[in-house]
Structure formats: structure tokens, C-alpha cells
Image (tube, grey):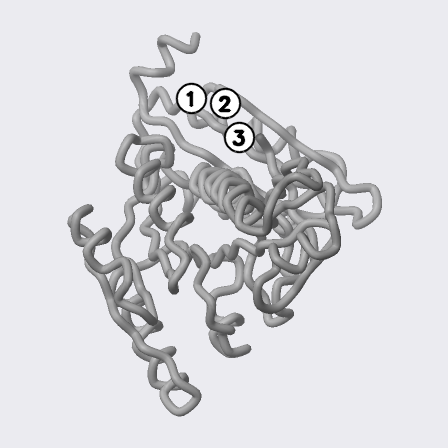
């Protein structure tokens, strides 16, 4: 069946709603009526919140177009008051990367995209410094220099929003962008901005976090990839990565190890978002891997 399905257009449906009987049946019936076959299906009912989450990848044997499927499923969705997305499985989300003076996450993401490991289209890179302009241009990607000072922050964010609108950006990735976004901008990017935070447990905030960790003699360092919210570095967590360290590592070697875990956590978060595997569950996330 998988080989037969591969000859037909494939789609990914994700939804969330109040957990009650009939949701899975309604989705399955809809797909049967549209001559579709399910390739994979995952669902989760959260007993604490009473919410239900589902991700279905399916092939359509009648060759239906995305718009037609979205319109028809909206009628099913209304019955259960679901929030849903329906995308073509080959559709690549348009992503804007943002960086400051630490370029390891930027370089890692650009390389993964180039080799096809993350199926997205990087439509531009925004930075408040010019350090990585040559790197970005080597990838033939537009580089936008937006310097930020307390006096120009508002204008810089307006220019950023203009770039997001002009490029029809689906996702913004803060790849070690070291500027605090305004509450208005955070709200405008709700659910479509991912940040990497150089902390797991214990947490060291502010400047030189790995040097702080070294001074405290930590045994684990880590990084957290999360959605951006108005609460600084406290948005819904998508992925975390850790590395075990010991007394023999200098502060510089902790920084190097930290770069690795930051790259890994952020890359997985961006990949899972691109593959429509993440659903928001209040302050948490449901990630169908």
C-alpha cells in the first residue's frame, strides 16, 4: 500500500480540540469518502487539560487539490470545534533566520537545509551585526542588516515585520539572536517563532552562562528550543538536549560543548515544526515524532 500511495499526492492534517467521542471516526470517515488512504496516524488525549491532538499523513487517490480538501474538512472541523492545519507533505515552509554575533546555530541550520536534512526554504537572514553577511551570501540567501539601539528598536521591528510580510514567512528562527523582542512583536509571531536558549538545568541567565556554569562546577549542560512568547525564555518547550561534563573541562570547552547541544536542539525543533509535528497545548507542546 505504501508504494501505491507514493504515486498520489500526500497531505498532513493536524488538529486539536476538546477530547470527546467521534473525532477519530469523523477524520477517518472523511478520508474514506475522499478516497484517501492513511499512511501514518498519531493521536494523544491529555487527561489533565481534556484536549485531544492528532496528526495524520495521508495520500489522496482522486488527486484532490489542497484547497478543496481544506474547504471540505472545515465543515467536519466545525462540528467538533477543532483548530486544524492541512498542508501538502511536500510544501516547504518559508523561514527567516535571525542571528547576532554567535553563528554556530545559523551555520548548522544553513548546512542542514542545503543537504536536505531540514525541508524548509530559507528566504532570508536578519542580523543586528554584519559578522555573517559573507557566510549568508555564500548560500545565495538575502542578508538583512538591521542594527538595533534603544532609540531605533521600534523602527527595526517595523522593518522586520515588513520583511516577514513581504517574504510570506511561515516561521522565524532566533538562531542566537541576542535582542529581546517587544511584547507586540512576540504576540504577532505567536506559534511561528522558535528560540534557542542556552540553558537546561541548572539555569544560568544573563551574560557568559557557560562561564557561570564552570564556576559552579556543573555536571550537565544543556539547551532548550522553545516557542517565543512575551515571557522571556519561558515559551512552550519543543526540545531539550544535554551533555554530561566534568571538572576537567575549562570554561572555553564548556562553551564548545554548549554550541553542540544548542545546534542539535534547535535543528530538531525546526525540523519537527517544518514537518507539522508540533501542536500547542497551553504552556506546553505535543510533539509527534
Vertical comparison of 183 with 140: above or below: below
Q: Which mark is residue 32?
A: 2
Residue 90 x, y percent position in the rendering? 32, 33
SS at mark 2 in the image: helix
Crowdedness of circle 2 by 10 Å Cα count: few (<14), some, many (20+)? Answer: few
The residue at which mark 3 appears reads as 56
- What's the CA distance linking mark 1 and mark 3? 15 Å
Give the residue at x 30% y 26%.
63
Residue 196 x, y percent position in the rendering? 53, 54
Give the residue at x 39% y 91%.
151
Badge 1 or badge 3: first in the primary sequence: 1
SS at mark 1 in the image: loop
Residue 264 x, y percent position in the rendering? 50, 39
Question: From the image, which quarter does the C terminus lie in?
Answer: top right
| Residue 67 in view of the camera | no
- Of badges 1 and 3, nearer the viewer stands 3
Q: Which mark is residue 35?
A: 1
Residue 19 placement, left or right of 138? right
Crowdedness of circle 1 by 10 Å Cα count: few (<14), some, many (20+)? Answer: some
SS at mark 3 in the image: strand
Are circles 1 and 2 on residues that touch, CB within 8 Å?
Answer: yes
Amino acid at each position: 500500500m505504501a508504494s501505491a500511495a507514493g504515486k498520489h499526492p500526500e497531505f498532513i492534517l493536524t488538529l486539536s480540540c476538546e477530547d470527546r467521542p467521534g473525532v477519530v471516526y469523523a477524520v477517518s470517515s472523511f478520508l474514506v469518502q475522499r478516497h484517501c488512504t492513511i499512511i501514518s496516524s498519531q493521536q494523544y488525549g491529555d487527561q489533565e487539560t481534556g484536549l485531544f491532538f492528532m496528526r495524520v499523513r495521508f495520500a489522496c487517490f482522486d488527486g484532490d487539490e489542497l484547497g478543496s480538501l481544506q474547504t471540505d474538512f472545515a465543515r467536519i472541523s466545525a462540528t467538533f470545534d477543532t483548530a486544524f492545519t492541512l498542508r501538502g507533505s511536500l510544501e516547504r515552509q518559508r523561514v527567516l533566520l535571525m542571528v547576532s554575533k554567535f553563528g554556530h546555530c545559523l551555520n548548522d541550520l544553513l548546512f542542514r537545509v542545503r543537504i536536505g536534512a531540514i525541508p524548509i526554504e530559507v528566504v532570508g537572514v536578519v542580523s543586528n551585526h554584519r559578522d555573517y553577511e559573507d557566510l549568508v551570501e555564500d548560500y545565495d540567501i538575502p542578508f538583512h542588516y538591521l542594527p538595533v539601539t534603544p532609540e531605533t528598536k521600534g523602527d527595526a521591528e517595523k522593518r522586520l515585520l515588513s520583511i516577514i510580510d513581504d517574504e510570506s514567512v511561515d516561521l522565524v528562527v532566533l538562531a542566537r539572536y541576542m535582542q529581546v523582542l517587544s511584547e507586540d512583536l512576540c504576540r504577532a509571531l505567536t506559534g511561528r517563532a522558535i528560540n534557542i536558549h542556552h540553558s537546561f538545568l541548572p539555569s544560568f541567565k544573563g551574560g557568559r552562562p557557560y562561564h557561570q556554569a564552570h564556576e559552579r562546577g556543573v555536571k550537565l549542560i544543556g539547551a532548550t528550543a522553545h516557542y517565543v512568547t512575551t515571557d522571556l525564555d519561558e515559551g512552550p518547550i519543543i526540545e531539550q538536549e544535554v551533555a554530561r561534563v566534568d571538572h576537567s573541562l575549562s570554561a572555553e570547552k564548556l562553551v564548545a560543548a554548549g554550541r553542540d547541544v544548542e545546534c542539535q536542539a534547535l535543528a530538531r525543533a525546526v525540523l519537527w515544526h517544518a514537518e507539522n509535528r508540533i501542536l500547542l497545548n497551553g504552556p506546553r507542546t505535543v510533539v509527534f515524532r
